[in-house]
Amino acid sequence: MELFPTVSPEIVVREARIEDIWEVAETHCSCFFPNYTFPLDLMLRVDRLVAMLSGFTVQHGTRRTCLVAVVGSRMDETFFLGSEDFKVGGLDGKFSLHRGYVAGILTVDTVADFLPRKGPLRQRRTGIAYISNVAVREKFRRKGIAKRLIAKAEAQARGWGCRSITLHCDFNNLGATKLYKGQGFKCIKVPEGANWPQPKNSPDVKFKFMMKLLKAPTAS
């Protein structure tokens, strides 16, 4: 058993563990609120940390997970502390002696908070996954990390039995729009007069609603 394996530049995309939450919070805040300074930036990070611990416990029948792209990690990590059954706020409670550095994050769920409701009873939609909080630290951008996070989210959604995956994208973020279209997402036109839910953000921010149909895994 190798307790202290050599650090490599390999990028591993996996589900977040409890040991990652501070770096996840830092990645989220540094990407979405880059101009905030102390003490507000610290307060934002603590708020994000608390939100993660509480927000990943979802209602019965729905799923949510945070994915992380970790630099300097390996797929064959050989030494863990903790049990696979130990969870904190829905996060894996295992600790690794060689976990690497969180370079990117993404959340995927089937909670359907930001999907249009179905029918006159406004029922939650099922079978549709939703991507949010896609962020990559600045020095690790343009290395394909976001694409790998999205691909992992799609695989996760298929594993949950979802037939499609959706997201909201800022109208003015042309780079993100190009990224998502390159991954097969299509813009969905919101019917005139429809009041579809959107992420809670500045009222000045307008979003595109994008969707991708998921192919069933090919049998080998």
Image (spheres, helix red, strand yellow):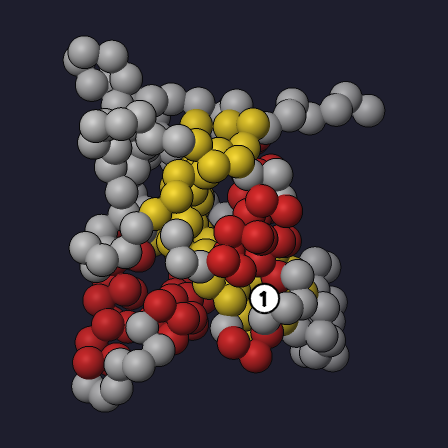
Against 187, residue 206 (above or below) is below
| Above or below, comparing residue 149 to residue 37 in the picture | above
Q: Nearer the viewer, residue 5 or 175?
A: 175
Q: Quadrant of the N terminus?
A: bottom right
Residue closer to the observer: 40 or 220: 40
Depth check: 32 or 129 in front? 32
Residue found at x 24% / y 37%: 197
Q: Which residue is situated farthest in the top direction here?
A: 120
Tell me the kind of residue under disc 1.
Val
Task: Identify the residue shown where x is 75% and y is 24%.
Answer: 218
Residue displayed at 27% across by 42% down:
198
Residue beneath label 1, please?
70
- Asked if residue 121 shows in the view, the reply is yes
Residue 178: image x %, image y %?
57, 52
Badge 1 crowding class, 10 Å Cα cut-off, few under 14, some 14 to 19, many 20 or more, is: many
- Give x and y (percent) for residue 32: 35, 68
Please give the name of the residue rendered at 22% of the width and 58% of the height, measured from the top-left corner.
204
Q: Residue furthest front?
A: 192
Secondary element type, mark 1: strand
Q: Residue furthest right?
A: 220
Q: Residue 67's x, y, as percent?
A: 50, 53
Instruction: Say which quadrant the C terminus sits in.
Output: top right
Is residue 168 shown above or below 50?
Answer: above
